Amino acid sequence: MIRPLQQSLLTRVLVSSGTLAMLSVCGLTSLFLWNYSRDLDRQISSRAEALAGFLAGQSQFAMLVGDRPELERIGRNALSTDEVLFVELIDSQGGAPAFFHRSGPGSNASGNNFIAITRNVMRPAQVEGSEWEAGGTGRLSGPSQLGVVRLGFSTEREHAARMRIVWITVAIAVAFLLVAAGVETLQLRTLLGPMHSLTAFTRRVAEGDLSGRAEVVRPDEVGRLTMAFNTMVERLGATLVSKEAAEAANAAKSRFLATVSHELRTPLNAVIGYSQLLQEVCQDRGIQGLSEDLIRIERAGGTLLHMVNQVLDFSKAEAGRIELHAETFPVRRVIQDVIATAAPLAGKNRNRLSVSMDSDAIEIHADLMRFQQSLLNLVANACKFTADGEVSVEVSRERSGPLDCVLVSVKDTGIGITPEQQGRLFQAFVQGDASTTRTYGGTGLGLAISRKLCRLMGGDISLKSEPGKGSNFMMRIPVGMDPPVAKGDEHGASSATVVGG
């Protein structure tokens, strides 16, 4: 019984409203019948008391003078009333009681359907000292009570009327409850019908069917709810279409970038290789005037190759096709390699590079190449955006939740980053502002790729910076956690390390 009540709103409302209506009707019916019975009993008692008083008044003189025939006449006359079952007149001055009872139909009251009334017959005050009194001496010689009148008054007729009223009242109450239940059921079905339709439509929407719309039956609260739900479904459909289009466009972009980047690397490697070869030929043959041009060609090709590698790494990260190879390696060796690689860039801007480590024996288990690539991006950025300043790399171990991590902080005294710029700094193809791109160059991919690589290895990159006071990029990588392995790369890994962005 409890489960249907919990599952059906119609049943719950019907049961609650039916219970309330039943309690109300039963209470009102009981109150009406109680008042009716009390008034009827009062009327019966009043009539019986009046009749007994009348008989007592008639019996005064007969009991006073001891007139037995008169008492019998009074008793027989009393039986002429239909409600009187028996009459008993008792003379307290002697003599047998005069008892009369009805015979024939209606002579016996069933059960307790009668009342017995007893009334004392008192001596009238006017006859004190009367000589009419039997054995009278001219003065009051007997008791003030002359006798007793007992009357049996039938309530059979009132009992039948009472039962008839009870049954009629109960029948009216039951009919009222049935009619009310029917009206309530019809009203609730009318109200909850649109809710059932809306529920069925919701199930179809949950299954992915966004083509239809729920029918608006009435312009009430349920109708407004249905219209709001239809609006939500329309917007959801438009959002899904936009999402699918965006996902398709993003997938196409990633495929295009991966394909184009891969195809560009081959001719770029050829350009760099031939420029280096031509430089060696010029040196061997003593050709003057071409070396500087060939160096510029090699440098431009290298820069372009770095950008292509960034785009390729980003497209692979977006597509989830970066493959990580975990190994255990000392952090100090990687730091030294990164410092050696970034030293020319630091010297170009007249920056001082420094390294600080808690311990020379710090080792981690991660992808060596991706760790070095991420750190080199941070150090190269610090050197690029700092002039005549300091760039320091600090390495320590810390506890980050349940993980033991290596924290590498790259601090600089460069231009700094505003809070607004920090919010979009790790987005792809985004730098601080347009002036930064014009002044320092770059594609805006270095930080985005570094954060993706760190998160693939179970870590992350965070930033603290103030404009004009430099920046502090903090790279955290778990010490003993195996990095996740992504799907294989159909184009192969990048052959060159990304330096800066």
Image (cartoon, grey):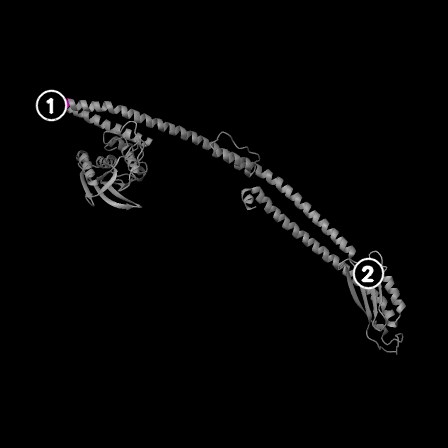
Image location (x, y in percent) of residue 300: 21, 26
- The region drawn magenta spans 278-282
Q: Which of 418 and 360 is in front in this view?
A: 360
Residue matched to label 2:
85
For residue 281: magenta? Answer: yes
Image location (x, y in percent) of residue 154: 79, 59
Amino acid carrying mark 1 in the image: Gln
Label annotation for residue 103:
none
**In the rendered image, is residue 349 in sight?**
no
* Quarter holding residue 483: top left
* Crowd around label 1: few <14 · some 14–19 · many ≥20 (10 Å): few
Q: Nearer the viewer, residue 266 or 240?
A: 266
* Quarter holding residue 250: top left
Label located before the other in sequence (2 or 1): 2
Q: What element carries label 2?
A: strand
Image location (x, y in percent) of residue 288: 11, 21
Amino acid carrying mark 2 in the image: Leu
Task: Note whether 229 is above or below 146 in the view shown.
Answer: above
Q: What element carries label 1?
A: helix
For residue 267: magenta? Answer: no
* Quarter holding residue 69: bottom right
Q: In this view, does 187 lie to the left or right of 272?
A: right
What's the CA distance linking mark 2 and mark 1? 153 Å
* Crowd around label 2: few <14 · some 14–19 · many ≥20 (10 Å): many
Residue depicted at x 61% and y 49% = 20
Image location (x, y in percent) of residue 352: 17, 39
Residue matched to label 1:
283
